Amino acid sequence: MADAHPTTPRLGSLLVRLVMLIALSFAAGIQPASAQSILRDAETEALFHDMATPLIKAAGLDPRNVDVVLVGDNEINAFVMNGQTVYLNAGLINSADSANQVQGVIAHELGHVTGGHAISGEQGAKAAGTISLLSILIGVAAAAAGGGDAAMAAMMAGQSAAMGKYLAFSRVQEAQADAAGASFLAKAGISGRGSIEFFKKLEAEGYKRGYSQADQDTFMSSHPLESDRIALLEESYKKDPAWNRASDPALEARFRRAKAKLYGYLAEPEDTLKAYSERDTSVPARYARAYAFHKEALMDKAMGEIDALLKDAPADPYFLELKGQIMMEAGKPAEALAPLRRATELTGNQPLIATTFGHALVATEDRRNYPEALRVLKAAVSRDRENPDAWYQLGVIYDATGDAPRARLASAEQQVMQQQWPMALSSAEAAQAGLPLGSADALRAQDIAMQARAAIERKKKRK
């Protein structure tokens, strides 16, 4: 399938999505665009869902319509945008000591959602709010440029400076979000203790960095946390019966795992090994080290950590997923099939894990695996259409089996997410010409073509 972007194996089980977050200034005009990386991981997304669902319900929102998304930025930051999406920076997760602290941040951001404070405006905010742009696996840019370090540096450059531009909330809106967040925590029966702990942490961090009230580039400065404001919140929280209620131990254990996994994925291996010494045999430490060793291409040591985890939890789907991924990246896709198939089954065909499994089936280059790959990947995109790797692998299968129209349709789906409108239009028209008239796939190709034409026309008018 010539139109699709090739992929290379990703690092561990985290899927990186590049999203153009176009900074809009409502007072001084348009700011420059900057690329942001959205990190997608099945385990982390499941954790965020379970952490946020009680709060979302308490806010009177439908959990099916609210997303909590992880941003690959090391600044301590959180924000909302167009729609009902809460964005949490990796730096915020790394700084938090507990799931309860992060729940306090989520509650606050949901206060902005229900208060209608989310930034909106034209295509940039809309695109960022729906997260429907270019998605790539870690290493794709490296494959194109010939160097992994340079690719990652290019991908991450400029993120911190751009993110803060979305956070120019007024003091009135912040007070409203504080009050709303406190009420959501109370209704959900979740202690506000973590919220106060994290706000104090942010205040201390802001003073340490020397931010002024006029500096609007970070969570700390755009969410001013003066002592009297924290005191007001603390007084409110202490009146709630949930103040002394302990956080769910299972949720806290899952948070420690996800935090270690994220740290191992993003940090330099030497930093990971300092933070999680080999003397530490806890689950989070082994998880983090598995990523560190994997990044250093120390497969035996990485597999040693994963096998130790699986010895104690042989049916853990996320450990199985990582084992399969390491096998794939070691050039052993056939050996990756068993753990990935099991992980897919255990998670009820979770789309991101199913995509990795489908990728492994394709990577075996064994045509006997293609029918299973086709079934798995079609199921993945039916549940998560904004999954470019699934579309790419699906296109490979269609192309290999001689189904050119559906291969072109898969390319069109990818190109829409990349906002490559002329290419999407060409692919959609080619697909439509070869698909049965009136079929679901033909209608989808028609919809993409119409969407692409409209986007092209809008672009022409702006010029």
Image (cartoon, rainbow, N blue to C red):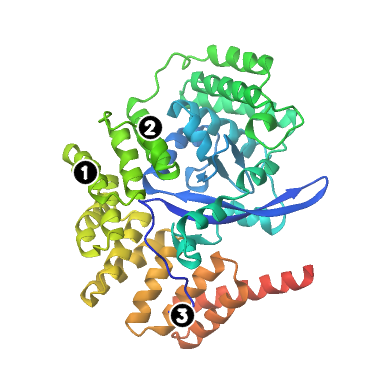
Q: Is residue 322 left or right of residue 11?
A: left
Given residues 382 and 367, the one toward you in this image is: 367
Q: Disc 2 residue type? A: Lys
Q: Earlier in the sequence, mark 1 or mark 2?
A: 2
In percent of width and height, residue 283 lies at 28, 34
The dot on residue 369 is: none
Q: Earlier in the sequence, mark 1 or mark 3?
A: 3
Q: Secondary structure at mark 2?
A: helix
User: Residue lying farthest bottom?
Assistant: 433
Q: CA distance from mark 1 to mark 3?
A: 39 Å
Q: Secondary structure at mark 1?
A: helix
Q: Is residue 311 left or right of residue 277?
A: left
Q: Which residue is mark 1?
A: 304
Quadrant in the picture for residue 455: bottom right
Question: Taking 38 as reference, is 418 above or below it?
Answer: below
Which quarter of the rendered picture does the C terminus lie within?
bottom right
In percent of width and height, residue 70 lies at 50, 44
In percent of width and height, residue 242 lies at 46, 17
Which quarter of the rendered picture does the N terminus lie within?
bottom left
Question: Taking 54 as reference, is 439 above or below it?
Answer: below
Q: Say whether marks 1 and 3 touch (CB < 8 Å).
A: no
Q: CA distance from mark 3 to mark 2?
A: 44 Å
Quadrant in the picture for residue 204: top right
Q: Secondary structure at mark 3?
A: loop
Residue found 64% across the figure and 25% down from its top? 206
Q: Nearer the viewer, mark 3 or mark 2?
A: 2
Q: CA distance from mark 1 to mark 2?
A: 18 Å
Q: Which residue is mark 2?
A: 274
Q: How many marks?
A: 3
Q: Which residue is mark 3?
A: 2
Question: How many neighbours does mark 2 have within 10 angstroms: few (below 14), some (14-19), or many (20 or more)?
Answer: few
